[in-house]
Image (spheres, helix red, strand yellow):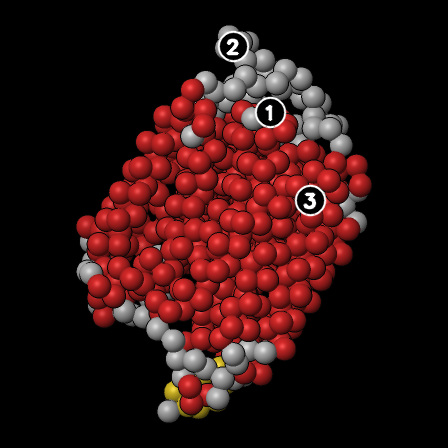
Amino acid sequence: MTEPAPIPGLRGRFTIPSLAFGGILMAVMQTVVVPLLPDLPRLTGASAGTVSWTVTATLLAGAVLTPVLGRAGDMYGKKRVLISALTLMTVGSVMCALSSDITVIITARALQGAAAAVVPLSISILRDELPPERRGSAVAMMSSTVGIGAALGLPLAALVIQYADWHVMFWLTSALGALGIAAVAWAVRESPVREPGRFDVVGTLGLAAGLVCLLLGVSQGGQWGWTSGPILVLFLAAVVVLALWTWHQLRAKAPLVDLRLAARPRVGLPHVTALLTGFAFYANTLVTAQLVQAPKATGYGLELSIVATGLCLLPGGITMLLFSPVSARISEARGPRVTLALGAAVIACGYAVRIADSRDLWMIIAGATVVSTGTTLAYSALPTLILRAVPAEQTASANGVNVLMRTIGQATSSAAVAAILVHHTSEVGGVQVATLHGYLLTFTMAGAIALVACAAALVIPRDAAAAEPPRQARRGVHAVAPERTEKGA
């Protein structure tokens, strides 16, 4: 394989920071709306149920667009599609800054869902652009940006909302988005590694319909009722549509998702582990924010402000930044399979700390930080496993599917946490509030899922650390399509 030539000068030194900045922006955009949710009904004149779609729309759009944009990146150019995703994210932020109409805001938040493809596209660019000795640490850093951005987004948004008009927050994120676009356009070189073919429009529409039905059912089940007619119809439609989509993908000459490749243990098991890890990780973010804001009258609540709550999550984000190079070194020494299993085990240990003590602030922060540390190890190892198991020209789409599995895990986690807390409440000051027992059950569930993820990681074939697939495209050859990497690699 011909190694990529380094990007000369200042641009080369800013390639990794520019991509990492884009990943952090993506996570910030997803979290900045959270502090606004209690006040949005008053600010927009909409109902609380309608306002919840500012989160649901981003989730659905991101789930649908991540594999689609990943496939488009493999076909048409990863940098080109990455800039398109960042542009949609920034346009959505500008729309939110200009309007107080809930319909416009929900539409804008759906556009911002395209940013979910930023991380898998960036990881694929790093695979194509960096030599092997720099690739591991760069991919680990890129993976950790999800947690770093989430930890920064909440306190940033809370501070802006507390001291300025809420539209200012979206003007700020719009400016950051424009900066991110400019940085990627300047510092990142387009990869010549492509997988030529015709775009699978039927597969795209089928996947979109199936995922919308599935995730809409999961996200709205608690509100509409799990046995209600609309939810049952959505789940039935998801099963039928995704079954037909699978049939089509197995017969298409250029499928949106190569299911035969995904079915191989070296690819499929990391996807399963991504789903389980996403479930376990997300419960930590959901529960910590609610627990520390609970009234003191509950006997366990600390009644913290939203700004203080964001600061409680900040150590986890800092830890993710610090541990990303550690994760890369463990993967180099022991293999990403071991790093993934270790990360899942550390997540389980973090929940053990949460179960042991969820009353003292320092123990809550310690437990949440341990979970974040495990998440860093796991999330940093997942793309490395995928990169070593798939052909070079399919890295963006394969990593897109992996991120999709994390998204499904997070959506399922949100529904499961809500179901547990709703069924374990007590009245405090005339308001139904979740009990400490409900939170402890949530920690137990998430810790158990993390242990299952650890077991799944350990059965990934040991040859996952084998040399990556041969024959990336030679640089400088533009007239001839890159030679296709062997599928069996």
Q: CA distance from mark 2 to mark 1?
A: 17 Å
Name the mark on residue 330: 3
Pinpoint residue 72: horizontal percent, then vertical percent: 49, 30
The local secondary structure at tag 1 comes to: loop
Q: Quadrant of the N terminus?
A: top right
Pinpoint residue 76: horizontal percent, then vertical percent: 47, 24
- The residue positioned 45% from the left and 43% from the top of the image is 23
**Considering depth in this image, is 260 or 146 the residue closer to the camera?**
146
The local secondary structure at tag 3 comes to: helix
Q: Within 10 Å of the Cα at label 2, are there few (<14), some (14-19), or many (20+) other Cα atoms?
A: few
Nearer the viewer's eye, disc 2 or disc 1? 1
Precedes in sequence: disc 3 or disc 1: 1
> Mark 3 belongs to which amino acid?
Ile
**Considering depth in this image, is 55 or 237 the residue closer to the camera?**
55
Name the mark on residue 16: none
> Mark 2 belongs to which amino acid?
Gly
> Which quadrant of the figure has residue 8?
top left
Q: Within 10 Å of the Cα at label 3, are there few (<14), some (14-19), or many (20+) other Cα atoms?
A: some
Q: CA distance from mark 3 to mark 1?
A: 18 Å
Nearer the viewer's eye, disc 3 or disc 2? 3
Q: Is residue 419 above or below residue 427?
A: above
> Mark 1 belongs to which amino acid?
Pro
- The residue positioned 57% from the left and 19% from the top of the image is 4
- Residue annotated with mark 2: 476
- Residue annotated with mark 1: 131
Precedes in sequence: disc 2 or disc 1: 1
Q: CA distance from mark 3 to mark 2?
A: 35 Å
Q: Within 10 Å of the Cα at label 1, are there few (<14), some (14-19), or many (20+) other Cα atoms?
A: some
